[in-house]
Image (cartoon, coloured by chain):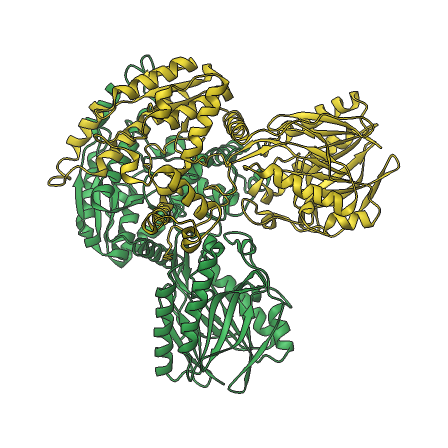
Chain colours: A green, B yellow
Amino acid sequence: MVKLALAQINCWVGALEYNTQKILDQIKLAKKYKVDLVIFPELAITGYPPEDLLLKPQFIKDNLKALKKIVNASKDIVIIVGFVDEKDDKLFNAAALINNKKIIGIYYKKMLPNYGVFDEIRYFSPGEESPVFKIKGLKIGISICEDVWKDSGPVSDEVKKGAELIININASPFHVGKIKERESVLKQRAIENKVPMVYVNLIGGQDELVFDGGSMVLDPGGQIIARASQFKEELLIVDFKESNKLEKIQTTEEEIYNALLLGVKDYVSKNGFNDIVIGLSGGIDSALTLAIAVDALGADHVKTVFMPSAYTSRQSMNDARDLAKNLKVELLEIPIQPVFSAFKVMVSKAFKGHAHDITEENLQARIRGNILMALSNKFGWLVLTTGNKSEMSVGYCTMYGDMAGGFAVIKDVQKTMVYKLSKYRNKLSHIIPESVITKAPTAELKPRQKDQDTLPPYDILDEIMADYVEENKGFNKIMKKEFEDKTVRKVISLIDRAEYKRRQAPPGIRITKRAFGKDWRVPVTNGYKF
Amino acid sequence: MVKLALAQINCWVGALEYNTQKILDQIKLAKKYKVDLVIFPELAITGYPPEDLLLKPQFIKDNLKALKKIVNASKDIVIIVGFVDEKDDKLFNAAALINNKKIIGIYYKKMLPNYGVFDEIRYFSPGEESPVFKIKGLKIGISICEDVWKDSGPVSDEVKKGAELIININASPFHVGKIKERESVLKQRAIENKVPMVYVNLIGGQDELVFDGGSMVLDPGGQIIARASQFKEELLIVDFKESNKLEKIQTTEEEIYNALLLGVKDYVSKNGFNDIVIGLSGGIDSALTLAIAVDALGADHVKTVFMPSAYTSRQSMNDARDLAKNLKVELLEIPIQPVFSAFKVMVSKAFKGHAHDITEENLQARIRGNILMALSNKFGWLVLTTGNKSEMSVGYCTMYGDMAGGFAVIKDVQKTMVYKLSKYRNKLSHIIPESVITKAPTAELKPRQKDQDTLPPYDILDEIMADYVEENKGFNKIMKKEFEDKTVRKVISLIDRAEYKRRQAPPGIRITKRAFGKDWRVPVTNGYKF
């Protein structure tokens, strides 16, 4: 058998030169290991997903130029690399097989996903060929991502044509449980076709998506015989004659935490920021967000600001201060009362005769949003928002207030999972004060306010929401779990009505199978009542 | 020949009962006119585009129940209506042919658009049949929207099978020039197949899209022999033995103005609002937005607020007051200086040693955004934003400031077109003060500020932007028009860098062939340099 290198790299969408240089470096390294074949992920040259960059003719040309550089580096090694090919005015999601300065074969992806977060039919035409290539006497078939998900599909066609090894290159985004789904499909495919499978995935954050790596090799019995790390770049060397590295799969909390960490790290660096700023409330959402940011960027690059009002408790202040101290980050303190008072005077004539209501609550959140954005403007810090998925779903958040910022770290993390992740992080080192975890959640926008005055308990809310949002279940199906009728109605109706808020939310990291992002395309104007 | 009614109705996405009632009313009316066949638009039952509502199994069921009600109303009349069908776990964009309480035929759309604003392959499977139906001795073929855009496509198949009349039902969104494109395609199709064509489109606003109607009938020579109004509901009766109503096509300015008017009207009413509020600056963008809002909703439902700072000129104040007076709308005046001063004191410690810069400019815009949102919260008014496409493209706008609001009326209107539309509106009745049109554009966020200090002249900016955004041209192609090298570079780079702002902008009405909405899917994290 041939000796392989699975190049699990972190690509940067659009950064053709950066990606190409990274690929060239890995080729050099693979040569050092005397590898026969080095394999790169799907669309490694362009990064994934390039979205509407693919509609720019110059972008396609530039990607082909980059491919040439890789071709020129292929002396004495075989390379498989993902790129965009153009033929007869059509674009293809392609893999080039390269050796000794020549492209010796090209494979075009056949199964183009156009569901969930994927829009591939917007750009690409499906391939129709099932070529089989010979490398050092071994016949290989190439497939791209979705191609292996089909029973009796492209893989079977190639095996029928004699392929003895299937290479599958991917840009497969993370969600909880995804790695098990992949394993199961690959196992099925290996057994179905009695063929070893090589699965190469990329890593890295790209707007809302995080790619988790976990590249692997299966034997014809469907046994995993080699696996790379999750969320880390790696050149996994696989020699079929020896036993290989077999990384353990991370626990759910570990996976999610690392996905969030990588997502933040890459969004910040790939968008050219050095430092970020977070508003600390003393609550658990901002505490977890801060912990992730510090783990991703280092304390020196993380600024925090505490913005108390008359409704802020001493406990919240102590918790915010303790947290900042534990994480060794700078903490600014800017009380908002003077501006809040000035605001109330300013609108007093317009509001005459109207009682305080949610308007004044939102105003406080928006003053805080303004402060964070002012710090961002003045010092070039990226504002990370701290809202969780439970809030985002029911609209328990203020537009231009706590929703103001560039990147929403835990946007797809339910409140119940926020607690789990905080406990997970505290096990690594105890940084989140215990009282932050144990006290009742509150927005502190009016006296004695608690989240649970307005919302169902989070364990119930989160389960109904997951059914409705992630599982696409309707009222009747959700009710099978014996929730209270009025609770389910309330949650669904809150979710439906909050669509206009989500439309203006910053992007955030997807960790579930359906986030409020590209896989959630719900009209704002919507007359449907369940 | 049969007597037809083209039911150009305003559907409401998701509002199945509302749409069904409207369809039933039109059937009744058609019966009164002794029509043989009444034709409704594509997906008339669900509204278009239903987006991810289509992923809800209950929604599909409810749409089929609505269809049954229509079937029951089909005594003595033939009906063609668009709905969603389900078969073998697949969804189809379908047209039902109904008569005497029976579905006598179903057509499934074959050509599913998955480009621009369209995502139909996300939801639907393509049809494969070309049925031909007999009505009162006449053989008809049915097609849905995109089906007629293909040479030797579905229409030809039906004509080969004997169809003597082609019915084409549509949900075709407006953009400038679209009606000419449609006419040209339908003409081609009629001539190619020597067959009369009936084109039925809907009207109405749905989030960013506006459907413009303009339903029409062509004879086999490609001549248009009947045409309905644009942007208005209508039951167009067509009798092939007589001459029929032939509405004139509107001018470009008229079309755009009416599209904006309908877009505002429907967004406001379909989302359950009664009143809207606009911040008036004294400038032309807010003036035009206000004129549109008043024409759409009536002066009683439109509130305005003028929020001067120390940098606001007396001219701006006079212009804002004159405009409000001309349009007979309520004008609140809320000076922002007290809050601005309080803010500066509040952040003075954090900003110590740093000069005033864009931070303080943005702060003013955000205080205004806060006031508008506070009015919205307190009184339930929808905030309409006033930013134009030129600003949105280069990021000459403040997140959470002038971008704050629920609906961005002129988001897809270039500044140069803002002037044209203002002049067009003034011809109908002179409401926008002359000085608003003649003075140099300014944001008035610092002393003596003019847009043109920062941006290229708008006629140049708009042309480069249209090339880059709407035509997808790259640097080299744009430079063929002999712009200055550095101007083109600057504009492209500003557009690229403003992506993060657009991601959090409110939805707004699409009037060009590429707006910053569903047809603009550009990554925020983007390393591509032209």
Q: Residue furthest right?
A: B137
Examine the rendered structure and indicate whether residue B285 appears above or below residue A475: above
Res. A391 visible in picture: no
Q: Residue furthest left?
A: B353
At x 66%, y 42%, the residue is B184
Report the side of B492 relative to B31 (left or right): left
Image coords of residue A14 (percent x, y) = 40, 59
Report the side of A250 relative to A372 (left or right): right
Res. A214 visible in picture: yes
Q: Where, by quadrant of the figure, is residue A376 drawn?
A: top left
The front one of B323 and B270 is: B323
Image coords of residue A393 (percent x, y) = 44, 39
Image coords of residue A317 (percent x, y) = 20, 38
The front one of B184 and B47 is: B184
The front one of A90 and A419 is: A90
Quarter of the figure with the C terminus of chain A = top right
